[in-house]
Every structure is written in structure tokens, then in C-alpha cells.
Image: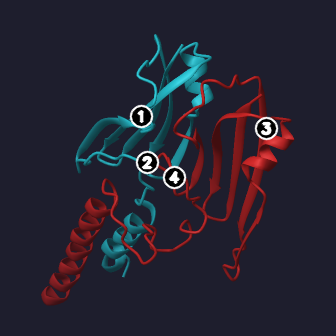
Chain colours: A red, B cyan
């Protein structure tokens, strides 16, 4: 009984040490921990998070952030108009198959806003639990 | 049984949930494990020496890597600073133990 409880205790202790270690590794650092540069062991978010030049921290459960897409703005172009184009990502929950579609190109966004000269672009990222993702490219110009 | 698996379950929960997507930017200074508060350039194409007279900021926030929200777009930062002519962009990143993270776009212009 005493031996059994000691084994149980050490297992729980090991779990806590493991948890603390994982926490230290996962929380503040930015090291890629899984193949493909992913940081999420379940792989649920890996495909859903868009690749962009500037990406603020995302949330595992829910993310909606807007950030710059172009880091330098052409100040000679006034931003009188705005156009948007979107792409979608879906992961069905039963087999985990994923689907990505849509045209989020600058050209499409510019055409949507009847923009001929682009001053700068930004994006809006929406992620829900790795099952739904949307990337809106927003173009400003005239 | 419940007690036996408690530690492992806790470890797994932390491993699965406590994994925030971290900052990604063209220039990222070295980040501290416990605390980071760094500013760095977003725009590295410095063809104009004039930064302009005004400055505007816009931020996003993230709690525990679970939820993230906010508008740190160029237009939001420009609007906050009353800027119509964007000349340069920097950013500020704050991380306190991974519990709270914020990203701020800083726009300079007139």
C-alpha cells in the first residue's frame, strides 16, 4: 500500500515536472517544436494559421486580429478607397480533412475597391479552434 | 485512478492549450523567457529620412495563448495618430510569461 502510494505520488510528481517543463518551453519561447515549424502538438492550428510577414500572437481557442501586410507604405498614394478579398480554411472534425479556398490576392482586393494605385495592404485573420480560418486582405489606395 | 492520472492530464492540458502562437515579424530582437518588452522596425526600407511629426499606435492582445483579439492594422494606427500620410512603421511587442502578450503597430507620419 505504502509502495503503491509512493509510485502514485511519483507519477503525479513526474506529471507536474513535465507540465512545468512543457510550460516553460511552450509559453514564452518561439522555437519550432514540431516538424514543419509548428508549435501545436495536435496539429490543429498548424494549417489554419496563415503565413504572413507580420503576425501578432494567436490564440488556440479564438483569434481575430488585424495587422499590417505591407510594412512600408507608399506615401505618395492617397488612401481614399478600400478593397477586400478573402480566403477560407475549413477542417471537418470527423476525419480531420482540411480544405482551403478563395482568392485573397491584392489584385482581387484592388478590383473590389476599384483601386488603381495601392498605398498599402493589411489583413484580418479569424481563427476558431483550428477548425475555421479566414484571411481577409484589405487594400488601401486610390 | 483519478489521482494517478491527474498529473499527466494536467501536463497534457498545458501542452495542448498553453501553446500560444508567438510573434512573427521581419525583425525580432532576442526575447526573454520571463519578460519581453521590445520595439523594432516593421519597415526596413528607409528611403525617406523624414519620419513625420505625428505618431499613432494600435494594438492586439493575447491571453494565455488561448484567445487573441485586436486591430493593429496600419489604418487603425494612422487613424489613432491623425495621420493621413504614413511614412514609417515600427512595432512594440510585450510578453509577460506568456500569460499576457500584446503587439502594437506604431505608425509615423503627417
Q: Nearer the viewer, residue A49 or A12?
A: A49
x, y percent for residue A35: 43, 78
Q: Earlier in the sequence, mark 2 or mark 1?
A: 2
Secondary structure at numbered mark 4? loop
Does label 4 lie on the same chain as label 1?
no
The residue mark sitting in front, 1 or 4, is 1
Does label 2 lie on the same chain as label 4?
no
Q: Give the letter of the chain under mark 2.
A: B
Image quadrant assignment for residue A6: bottom left
Residue occupying the point 33% across, 64% down = A31
Residue B91 badge = 1
Provide the residue designation for mark 2: B25
Q: Earlier in the sequence, mark 4 or mark 3?
A: 4
The residue mark sitting in front, 4 or 3, is 3
Question: For the N terminus of chain A, which image quadrant?
Answer: bottom left
Q: CA distance from mark 3 to mark 1?
A: 25 Å
Q: Nearer the viewer, residue A2 or A28?
A: A28
Dot 2 and dot 1 residues touching (CB under 8 Å): yes
Provide the residue designation for mark 3: A83
Provide the residue designation for mark 4: A59
Left or right: residue A80 compared with residue A62: right
Dot 4 and dot 3 residues touching (CB under 8 Å): no
Q: Is residue A81 positioned above or below B81 on the image?
A: below
Amino acid at each position: 500500500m505504502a509502495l503503491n502510494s509512493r509510485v502514485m505520488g511519483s507519477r503525479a510528481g513526474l506529471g507536474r515536472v513535465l507540465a512545468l517543463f512543457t510550460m516553460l518551453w511552450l509559453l514564452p519561447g518561439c522555437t519550432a517544436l514540431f516538424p514543419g515549424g509548428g508549435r501545436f502538438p495536435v496539429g490543429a492550428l498548424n494549417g489554419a494559421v496563415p503565413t504572413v510577414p507580420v503576425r501578432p500572437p494567436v490564440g488556440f481557442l479564438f483569434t481575430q486580429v488585424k495587422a499590417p501586410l505591407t510594412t512600408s507604405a507608399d506615401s505618395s498614394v492617397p488612401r481614399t478607397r478600400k478593397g477586400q478579398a478573402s480566403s477560407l480554411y475549413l477542417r471537418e472534425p470527423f476525419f480531420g480533412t482540411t480544405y482551403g479556398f478563395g482568392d485573397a490576392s491584392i489584385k482581387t482586393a484592388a478590383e473590389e475597391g476599384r483601386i488603381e494605385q495601392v498605398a498599402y495592404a493589411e489583413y484580418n485573420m479569424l481563427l476558431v479552434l483550428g477548425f475555421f480560418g479566414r484571411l481577409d486582405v484589405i487594400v488601401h489606395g486610390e | 485512478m483519478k489521482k494517478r492520472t491527474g498529473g499527466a492530464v494536467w501536463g497534457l492540458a498545458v501542452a495542448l492549450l498553453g501553446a500560444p502562437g508567438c510573434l512573427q515579424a521581419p525583425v525580432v530582437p532576442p526575447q526573454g523567457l520571463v519578460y519581453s518588452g521590445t520595439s523594432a522596425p516593421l519597415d526596413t526600407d528607409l528611403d525617406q529620412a523624414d519620419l513625420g511629426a505625428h505618431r499613432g499606435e494600435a494594438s492586439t492582445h493575447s491571453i494565455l495563448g488561448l484567445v487573441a483579439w485586436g486591430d493593429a492594422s496600419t489604418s487603425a494606427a494612422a487613424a489613432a495618430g491623425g495621420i493621413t500620410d504614413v511614412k514609417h512603421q515600427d512595432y512594440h511587442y510585450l510578453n509577460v510569461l506568456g500569460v499576457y502578450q500584446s503587439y502594437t503597430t506604431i505608425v509615423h507620419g503627417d
